[in-house]
Image (cartoon, rainbow, N blue to C red):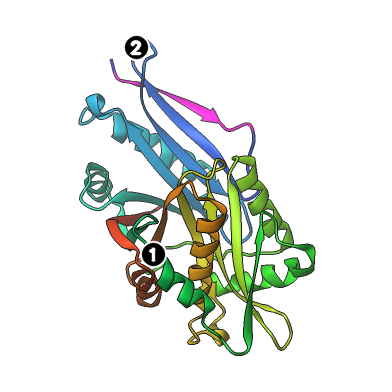
Amino acid sequence: MPPRITALTDPEPGASSRRLVQLASDADGVPLGSASLRLFTREGQEHLAELEIAVHPAERRQGVGTLLLDAAVAAARSEDRRSLVAQAEEGSPGDRFLADRGFRRVLGLTYARLALADADLAEITRLAELPHPGYRLTAWEGTVPSELAANYADSRRAMDDMPMEDTDYGTVVWDVERVVAAAETVAGRGELLHTVAALDTSDGSVVGFSELVVPGDGRGDGQHYGTAVLPEHRGHGLGRWMKAESIRRARAHHPGLTGLVTDTASSNAPMLAVNDALGYVPTHRAVEYQLGL
């Protein structure tokens, strides 16, 4: 008897997306796997859905993943999506699964980790304290201060030309509401959002930022969410400066942290160079796949 597919809906949609889940189970109701479909709802990304499929190892190669994929594709089409994206570790069974089912490779990602016990904190401190004439750093925890909110939202366009290769990711439209909602989402998960920003001293405007999310108990690994500089302010080492300060602050505020992890488009040579200069060590590579609907 083929697995039964049950459609589930997340009762609490997020500020920029909502989720549909397809659950595969056997005749006795025992779960075999699931497909989670994230439907983006913000302006500029209403065409996009993101897929995650998980099948119990003992149930693989029996058609469960294909059934889940078919159900997820049908659900995405019913929601008028034109692109479905999914990620898999390079060389993994998921990598082969997606490639064999018509997904097109559109982006390579390099994951790296800074082990804080092995980090050269003296060098990181030196980089964080280097003078950058015309600029200064500021930092906050959680939601951006109200006096910087509008300007910070405007600075998010620094991510618009982030290397995405062939991914049909759309245009992320940022405003104060979205910035605040993103911070509230992190807090709602019980995690801590730390932001370091570079300001233009001539007018106090935000010209770059580096975000780090730390587990609520301050232990384990923190996750870099994004580091970017406005195009007109690049070439001054601001990305490395902000990320070095972010590391220094995380180490000082959360001594229980063991590491910091980051992922970068494999074609983003400048940010890969920043990570290398700060001591991040590549751990694995992933592939972003896309299926046209």
Give the percent coordinates (x, y) of residue 228.
52, 72
Q: Is residue 263 magenta?
A: no
Please give the name of the residue rendered at 48% of the width and 38% of the height, measured from the top-left corner: 75
Does residue 178 sit above or below 123 in this rendering?
Answer: above
Q: Residues within 10 Å of mark 2 (few under 14, many from 20)?
A: few
Q: For mark 1, what is the residue? A: 264
Q: Residues within 10 Å of mark 1 (few under 14, many from 20)?
A: many
Please name whichever residue, 78 or 215, is drawn nearer the observer in this view of the structure.
Answer: 215
Q: Which residues are magenta?
A: 2-11
* Lateral position of residue 20 relative to residue 123, left or right: right
Please name whichever residue, 109 or 26, is drawn nearer the observer in this view of the structure.
Answer: 109
Give the percent coordinates (x, y) of residue 84.
42, 51
Disc 2/disc 1 C-alpha distance (Å)? 43 Å
Whether residue 161 can be seen here? no
Q: Secondary structure at mark 1?
A: strand
For the residue marked with disc 1, what is the amino acid?
Thr
Q: Which mark is residue 27?
A: 2
Q: Earlier in the sequence, mark 2 or mark 1?
A: 2
